[in-house]
Amino acid sequence: MGEQLVDVASTVEAILFVAEEPVAAAELSQLLEVPRTDVDDALVALQERHASGPSGLVVRNMGGGWRLYTDPETKPYLERFAATERSARLSKAALETMAIVAYKQPISRGQVAEVRGVDSDRVLRTLERRGLIFEAGRAEGPGQAVLYSTTNLFLEKLGLASLSELPPLADHVPPVGVVDVLERPFRPEEPSNESTS
């Protein structure tokens, strides 16, 4: 196996790791700009590597393409893990709350609720339990509300080195004219200057 093949195999493995559906060898060849035979050799090498040593993954050609799958022998442990709270996906409310905390931190429960328009206490507790946010301190003034900020785990899950890598909010805010049109139905009607006589 030549030096280029090792690089092709590693890159193919990385692509299969992130792919959500099987990837055809021809597509891999095109993506990597290498001959199809190099991709075929790399796929065979990956199959052998995962089959010969201790690995929780297998490489299979199914559904018209290649993909990484979990080893069937790990099924009981995967089922046990899937039943844990840690493995569950975040709800839309949790993702929304997470975004608010990320962009406005440190922020209190009341401020989050004000932005979302609903009580967010339960969602904040879930995010804290999962290690995505933490109590960063207390607000000054009456009540000294708990302030929340994101954790390093949050950065890790998003693949960010720091909060400065978050995309700017301005990229997602519609122009003023669009906001005006969207808010118009919710504004109280202005009194008419016309008389009703």
Image: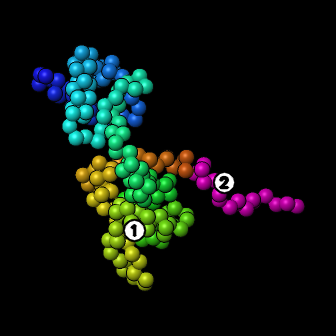
Quick one: SS at disc 1? strand
Q: Amino acid at mark 1?
A: Ile
Name the residue at 50% across, 63% down: 115
Checking the image for residue 9, the label placed there is none
Name the residue nearer the viewer: 54 or 157: 54
Q: Amino acid at mark 2?
A: Pro
Q: Mark 1 or mark 2: which comes first in sequence?
A: 1
Q: Is residue 19 above or below residue 44?
A: below
Side of 18 where 93 appears, left or right = right
Label 2 sits on residue: 185
Name the residue at 65% across, 59% down: 187
Side of 121 where 186 appears, left or right = right
Can residue 46 be seen from the camera position used here?
Answer: no
Q: Is residue 129 above or below residue 81?
A: below
Residue found at the very far bottom of the displayed protein: 142
Instruction: Tell me which segment is drawn in magenta.
Output: 180-197
* SS majority, magenta: loop
Quick one: SS at disc 2? helix
Q: Residue 52 location, x and y as percent? A: 21, 33
Q: In what quadrant of the picture does the N terminus appear?
A: top left
Name the residue nearer the viewer: 117 or 97: 97
Q: Residue 129 location, x and y as percent? A: 39, 66
Label 1 sits on residue: 107
Name the residue at 42% across, 71% down: 108
Count of numbered circles on the image? 2
Q: Residues within 10 Å of mark 1 (few under 14, many from 20)?
A: many
Name the residue nearer the viewer: 44 or 75: 75
Q: Residues within 10 Å of mark 2 (few under 14, many from 20)?
A: few
Can residue 94 be seen from the camera position used here?
Answer: yes
Q: Residue 54 location, x and y as percent? A: 22, 41
Q: Examine the structure image and report whether residue 49 is included in the region drawn in magenta.
A: no
